Image (cartoon, rainbow, N blue to C red):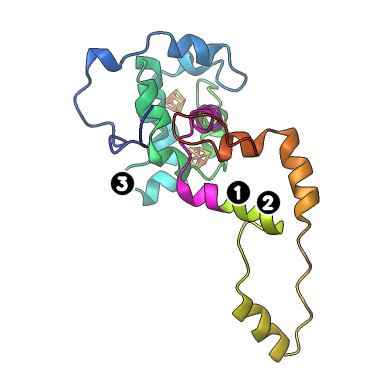
Amino acid sequence: MTEPAQASSGKEPIKASELDPKFKYQLLKTHGSEKILKCFQCGTCTSDCPVARYSDSYRPRTLIHMAQLGLKDRVLKSDTLWLCAACFTCTDRCPQDVEVANVIRVFRNMAAENGCVPQVFKDQAASLLESGYAYKIPELRVKKRESQGLPPLPKGNAEKVKKVLKGVKFMDSAQKPVGGQSSGQ
Ligand code: SF4
Ligand code: SF4
């Protein structure tokens, strides 16, 4: 795989060489996406998705359709994949019990395995390891709290966070270079 897709809209003409006929079988065997072929493209997931309502490009139905067709690279490199808020509305409303939110999670896990994680999440992952917080709290804000007599913020426990994340191979996938090997963290 190369850089995260500019082709994430999925509107470009499909080339036969892009199709991976094995992708759907891989999904059928993966926990969370076993029911993907039950999707009959009714569009309920997209029409009820709160993110799709405010996005011109995020369409869970389309991602599922692309996966059914075998457009693996387009799905995994899609930057819209990372817009899902994991609210599970789609899962509740899907008439085919596809468990759409879980399918999106599977796509993300596969994308991460291939190094297709947006830089913003890689930065958050690095911050978690360093400070125990997903966002670095600016020194200016800490000082402002002090000046206003507010109690100090609790210290993040980076070591504990590392221990937990190591168990789920978080850093292996979150920091993996695109299409490359793990950073080994
Ligand atoms: S609601 Fe279910 S069946 Fe309908 S398009 Fe979405 S995943 Fe497919
Ligand atoms: S879980 Fe994701 S795809 Fe499903 S409705 Fe919520 S934001 Fe949309």
Tell me: is circle 2 under 8 Å from ligand 2: no
**Residue 12: in sight, yes or no?**
yes
Nearer to me, 104 or 133: 133
- Quarter of the rendering containing residue 149: bottom right
Camera-side mark, 3 or 2: 2
Q: Which image quadrant: the C terminus?
A: top right
In this rendering, the answer to whether 73 lies above or below 26 is: below
- Find disc 1 in the rendering and name its residue: 125
What amino acid is found at the position of numbered circle 1 in the picture? Ala
Whether 176 is among the magenta residues is: no
Whether 119 is among the magenta residues is: yes
Check disc 1 and report its element: helix, strand or loop: helix
Kindly indicate whether the residue at mark 1 contacts the one at mark 2 (C-beta within 8 angstroms).
yes
Q: CA distance from mark 3 to mark 2?
A: 34 Å
- Find disc 2 in the rendering and name its residue: 129
Ligand 1 quarter of the rendering: top left
Nearer to me, 88 or 74: 74
Q: CA distance from mark 1 to mark 3?
A: 28 Å
Secondary structure predominantly adopted by residues drawn in magenta: helix
Mark 2 Cα shell of 10 Å, populated few (<14), some (14-19), many (≥20): many
Q: Look at the image and give the residue range highlighted in magenta.
A: 105-123
What amino acid is found at the position of numbered circle 3 in the picture? Asp
